[in-house]
Structures are given as C-alpha cells and as structure tokens.
Amino acid sequence: MRRLGNPAGPGQPPLVSVILPVHNADLWLDECLESVLRQDFEGTMELSVFNDASKDKSMTIIEKWRPKLEGSGILVVVGGHDSPSPRGVGYSKNQAIAQSSGAYLCFLDSDDAMMPGRVRLQYEAAVQHPTSIIGCRVRRDPPGSTERYTRWINQLAPPQLLTQVFTAHGPTVIMPTWFCSRAWFSHVGPFDEGGQGVPEDLLFFYQHLRKGGGLLRVDQTLLLYRYHPRAATHSVLETTIWTHRVRFLEERALPSWTSFTIWNAGRQGRRLYRSLTAASRQKVVAFCDVDENKIRKGFYCYEGAQERPKPRVPVLHFRAARPPFVLCVKLDLTGGEFEDNLRSLHLQEGRDFLHFS
C-alpha cells in the first residue's frame, strides 16, 4: 500500500501525473489501478484517466477505485467521451496530459501494471536528466511471449539505446515505460492523433531524438508488460513502420556516410535498397553476405529503377566488403553465427555499422 502522502495544496500541482488512456480495459483495470495505489513514491501524485469511448465496465471500475486512490492522497482526474468510435491512443494520451497538472508524466497502459518502486525510481532519474525519456526493464506476461523482443528491451547497453533506434523493434525505450518532465514533453509533443494504424509512440520517439533528447533506462524491472491480441500496437501495419524507419535512417544516419554496404543480399537487404531514395541508393557500394550462391552471382540488378542503365550492385563476401554497414540481418536467429562474424571484424557500433532489421 502506498504511504499516505500530503496532497498538493491549493494552487500547487502534484509532482507526478500518471497518464492512463483507457479503452475497453475492464479485464485488466483492477490490477492496473491497484499498482498505482501501491506506489512507494512519497511525493504528490495524481492519476489522469481519459476514457476513449469504452463500451465495457471500465468506467465502473475506475469509479470504484477513485475513493481508494484519493484516500491515499492520489488525486484522480477523469475525462473522456462516449462517441460511437474511439479517437485513438494518441488523442487519448494528449487529452489525459492536457487535463493533468503534474511536473512529471508517468505513462501507463491500462493493460499493464507497475511495480511499487516505479514512480519513485523513474522520478529520481528524470530529475537528473530533464531532457530524457526514462524507461525501465519489464516482465512480459504471459511469460515467454515475444521472447526475443523482451530480451532486446531489457538488455540493450546504454549506448545502444541510441545506436539501435532504426531496428524493426521500434523505440529502444518502449512507450509503456516512458517517464519524462512535462516541460520536455511540451517541447517535443504532442502525440500524433491520426488514430488507428498510426504509430504515435514511434513518431514521438523520432521527434524526441530530433530535438536532442536523451534516453535512459532504469535497470530494474518496474513494469508488468502484457501481450495480448487486443493491444493497440497490432493495428499498425508493418509497411507503415517500415516507411517511417527508412525515412528516419536516411535523415539521421546516411547523410554522414559518403558510401555504405548493405549486409544481407537476400530479401530484406534488397527491400531496403529499393526503399531508399535515388540519392541514398547511389551511396550503396555493395551488398555482402555469407551465402555462396548469392556471392557467386556477383551482383544485384534493380529492375524497377528509373535510372538507365539499371543499377547493378556488387554482392561480396562480408570479409571482402568495407564498412560502414547497414545490417539487415535479424539478431538472435542464426545460432550466434552472424554475431560472431560481425565481432570478428572489430567494428564500432554507431560509427561502422547500424542495425536496421
């Protein structure tokens, strides 16, 4: 149980606002709200709930928890709408933030649950890093679901929070764990409100990096991160994510390279090459691979190119290729062979290579 704190006095905003968008979350809300109540943070807190047209018992559960939370010194602010259709996660988060008043924002998904030390530990980190997004390690539920992704979330080294921002996994500090100052959010945001199918967290993450924001992970497991078919993330098409990732790669990384090699002459490497602008494709000096059949062919011809003659890009063994590399090989799927090959070249991540897959 949270220690009874002193509610913010008249005219004094709370230190932390927990931002909770809700849409048809009655299966998980009891556990989620109990985890807010159990926070051991001794500063002032509020819970800002925005109900995005829920048609289930979500609002009944929220009202049931309101007196328990307010009795523990946590102000509860509830907004929402009952339109026939939801407006989406980006809209709901923006509304929950707008109706809140805390100096710091702790984002919480209604299907997740926080460990008791989350707000305290992330607040301490955010005070020290006022222009950073603060994350944490997570425990996935059900156990074993998205095993590679969960391992990636939890085990990225601090420098990799910046060097691996182009991968298919998305933000290196994942949205359900975000904690930041309100001032910094206002500088970067708001979230895109395009609705279903828009990766509002990825777009905000990229804008955060454009503005010079930092990334930090508290290396403790502070969130139960639930995986289920109804999660909003499943509504975002892979092709949408791909397009945003390629454009961000071209914007942030490729301008500093006069030439580069795509590591993978197979489907993913060729797809990346075809997705690049003509100016970026001209920087690709080779593909590299370990597949003797691809290497023996000697080149890849982009038949769909507008240029004449059509581009023919050499395909080399990886030891014959030169950095920098854009790696289009998925990690953890080759029994360690790819990782061993990469380590053998003694390259520096960020300078000599970047992960894209």
Image (cartoon, rainbow, N blue to C red):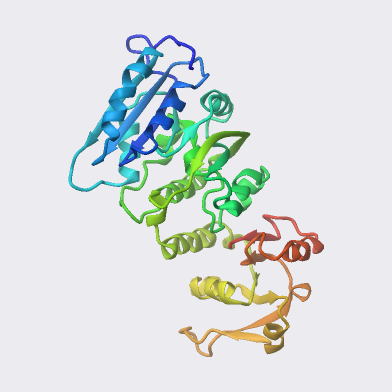
Q: Nearer the viewer, residue 2 or 312?
A: 2
Q: Quadrant of residue 314?
A: bottom right
Q: Quadrant of residue 239?
A: bottom left
At which x and y percent is residue 262? 63, 71
At which x and y percent is residue 268? 56, 72
Q: Is residue 250 left or right of residue 330?
A: left
Q: Is residue 324 visible?
A: yes
Q: Is residue 60 left or right of residue 157?
A: left
The residue lying at 41 percent from left, 52 percent from top is: 229
At which x and y percent is residue 226? 48, 43
The residue lying at 51 percent from left, 14 percent from top is: 42
- Label tally: 0
Q: Is residue 117 left or right of residue 186?
A: right
Q: Is residue 233 above or below residue 135?
A: below
Q: Quadrant of residue 68?
A: top left
The residue lying at 39 percent from left, 11 percent from top is: 7
At which x and y percent is residue 137? 59, 38
Q: Quadrant of the C terminus?
A: bottom right
Q: Is residue 327 above or below residue 305?
A: above
Q: Nearer the viewer, residue 350 or 22?
A: 22
Q: Is residue 302 above or below residue 211?
A: below
Q: Is residue 282 visible?
A: no
Q: Is residue 110 above or below residue 264?
A: above
